[in-house]
Image (cartoon, helix red, strand yellow):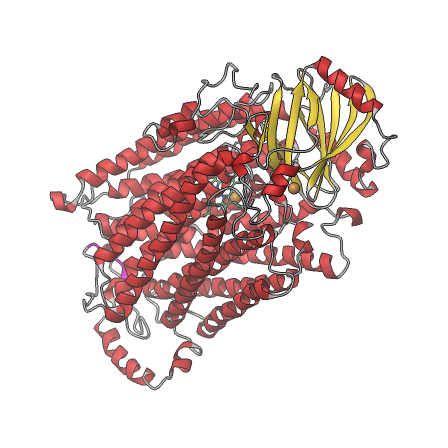
Amino acid sequence: MRAGGFGKHGIRFRAKQAFGVAGLMALGLFGGTAQANPQPGQLNLTPGVTTYSHIPYMLNNVALGVCVVIGILVFGAMFIAMFRFRKSRGAVPEKWSHNTTVEIIWTAIPVVILISLAWLATDGLRKFSDTTGSQMTVKVTGYQWKWRYDYVDYLGKPLHVDFMSKLDDQSNATRQLDSGLDPYAVKADGEQTYLLNVDHPLVVPIHTKIRFVITADDVIHSWFVPALGWKMDAIPGVINAAWTNINTPGIYRGQCAELCGQDHGFMPIVVKAVSQDDFAKWLADQQKAATPPAPAPASTAAAPAQATAQVAAKQSTQG
Amino acid sequence: MAHAATHDEHHDEHHEHLNFFQRWVMSTNHKDIGTLYLVFSLLMFFIGGSFAMVIRAELFKPGLQLVQPYFFNEMTTMHALVMIFGAVMPAFVGLGNWMIPMMVGAPDMALPRMNNLSFWILPFAFALMLSTLFLPGGGPAGGWTMYPPLSIQSASTAYVVFAIHLMGISSIMGAINIIATILNMRAPGMDLLKMPVFVWSWLITAFLLIAVMPVLAGAVTMLLTDKYFNTHFFDAAGGGDPVLFQHVFWFFGHPEVYIMILPAFGIISEIIPTFARKPIFGYKAMVFAIASIAFLSFIVWAHHMFAVGLPLGAEIFFMYATMLIAVPTGVKVFNWVATMWGGSMTFETPMLFAIAFVILFTIGGFSGLMLALVPADFQYHDTYFVVAHFHYVLVTGAIFAIMAATYYWIPKWTGHMYSEFWGKVHFWNSVVWVNVLFFPQHFLGLAGMPRRIPDYNVAFANFNMISSIGGFLFGASQLIFLGVLIHCVWFSKKKATDRVWEGARGLEWTLSSPPPHHSFTIAPVIHDEELAHGHVED
Ligand code: HEM
Ligand SMILES: [Cu+2]
Ligand SMILES: [Cu+2]
């Protein structure tokens, strides 16, 4: 994959053969993979490909590191105790059952550690919740079991491009019960895309702050592309906001992440990030081919009237 | 305690006249009802477990081989409902029924007839719920969290709602009974701060139950009226809000997860001192930690909803409150380790399960802490990382504690020793396979595999196969457990002494094994140094 990981964050590492070997834990901690899409044997989060996505990645690594250190200390003490204080070695039980000093210490130290983690996390959360200053707006609507994308505006100009995006035919044929088809044979551009490919990907430009407004039409779905670093629920009657700004061209795959009925596992998401020039060309093609302005709702007018009030309230708090 | 024994003979005679139906169906005896709860729980554990086997078999490799996606969703939903409401909760109520009167020096539970009713509601509730699998339209398939609008697309809403009401009534009656017993039936001298930690943990859990079961009942009733009576609580098109359901559900749901772990904390706090032959470290801190966890559990519910688009202020509040829970939880783990330190340990089966609990529950706590960090949770949420988290706290937490308790107290219950060899075989198989089952699920989640899907991309194949193998073998290991129990109850020749374990302290060990029909007909005299946590000063 072109997106193949670079980034200042994260050691480039292919963990393909790694499972089962002894270094597994260490790899989980530092290695994982810098690939943007799921890899066989992947052990850690992806650092992602956007201006934001390293934040959850680093937070994950720091928190995991903290847990591993605490784990080594606590479990280490436990194993020492289990070895030293065994009856079979003639250990005689002591009588104490209380020690105020150590109790205060092991209450206070975790508090300090937690405060530092909370500080890091709050910082990241603030960045994520700032959806201002976007150059492009895409409306995402979840349906049982496909996604609809409306391009609302780009560089200040309103757009009328929209389409449905659903599981590609090859995956769909293969996934039928007892289809006899081989999931490993489902490929696109040499990549194994079983259940992670769609008929019409969402095409977006890189180096552009894109604001997503996310909602649903029937039940709750969740729009999740790991390489972007977040997921956001798509809820009927509610419009949620999120943003991304992709650094690297590539094809980024994700899936619906909220149980939405029988085909919940079969409504993938594909984001195709291209250069701004390529995007301008793609957009022009779409507009030429364009159907007359979408019969169905463009942009926020879509939401049922009574939901708009809620949405306004949510957005004023969320920025 | 000699009195108790003499009394017993008299009663046993008296009860010989009871036929099977009278003894078990009409029972008002805390031990018999405790046994009923435990047997029911074991049955549900195997039914819920067989659903899990279906799930893991379908996920063994990519592609759909065995079941249709809708049936798969019914399996995940039923698995969770059966395990939570049918296996874990009744097991704790059964243990509470058996042990609380014996631990506080009472003859029986405070409200014996209500005790009978609260048990006998359960088989009907579960028969109703499980029957939906065989009805046209099928069972619930919207997840145990039952989020609308999806959950009311199902044909079985009314059955499930009614079953949940019954379970709620049962839990509330059980909780009232436990509170009444603990507050009113303690022997003179058994002050609140001398009670075993297990009794404390149940007292606090019972208050949680009474506080939140009605909230669940309210939430599911609103689902019912939305579906059948044209209300629009959760229907955006009618002015309602689907997110409201999630708030109400998790206001129940988070305390619920603590309902499933606080009694486990109590059990572990009984077992470790016994086999370390040293009183529990920091008794008061342990009690206070349970109480503060219970309090905090009411103000963290929205950590299950970080991705629904909460306002920034709410995300921050719920993140901080959630992280705070790690502090009292940490205190408990440190105190268990400190109890072992300087002790004189032996490693019988209950202790092995207790030690595994401390380590593996803590691993679940670690992933909980990671999940509390909102930006990271935007990645983890609704992936297999969450599945790994809650199975570490529930299987290697709650269920391991229940198994530890069973091995610990079954000699007292039956008067026979179980087979230590087969107990250990069960333990080592369980502890190995459960990790093979759940540890790789962390990796799947980190790589982005969503939960509740019947099929997946080939990149997820390796770890899913490992996990399924672990699952089958973990499931098979539980047949050893069944065998050990059957052997112990009916075939074991080895008599248990009254104290059973050399280091055991507390009133329950002063009774005969098996104990008399009415535990303490004459209030025992309490000697502080005889209590499990020793002599608490300061
Ligand atoms: C240190 C303590 C804990 C923390 C900080 C913690 C944190 C969390 C968080 C943040 C989530 C939501 C994850 C998500 O959906 O994105 C979660 C899920 C869950 N936790 Fe914990 N947790 C802790 C302990 C426990 C315990 C003790 C239990 C039960 C015995 C438990 C059971 C669950 C369950 C069942 C879920 C998933 C519910 C569902 O979505 O179906 N957790 N936990
Ligand atoms: Cu969906
Ligand atoms: Cu929770």
Relative height, residue B473 to residue A31 (above, below): below
Q: Where residue A29 sits in the image (x, y, percent)? A: 41, 26
Name the residue located 52 percent from the left edge and 49 percent from the top edge.
Answer: B65
Q: Is residue A24 magenta?
A: no
Which region is colored magenta?
B503-507
- Whether residue B368 is visible, yes or no, is no
A248 on left or right of A97: right
- Whether residue B245 is visible, yes or no, is yes
Extreme-left residue of the structure: A90
Relative height, residue A186 to residue B125 (above, below): above
Q: Quadrant of residue B139?
A: bottom right
A245 on left or right of B433: right
Name the residue located 56 percent from the left edge and 42 percent from the top edge.
Answer: A181
Q: Main secondary structure of the magenta part?
A: loop
Relative height, residue B430 to residue B407 (above, below): above
- Image quarter (top left, top right, bottom left or bottom right) of the N terminus of chain B: bottom left
Q: Is residue B505 magenta?
A: yes
- Which residue is more in the foreground, B422 or B177? B422
- Image quarter (top left, top right, bottom left or bottom right) of the C terminus of chain B: top left
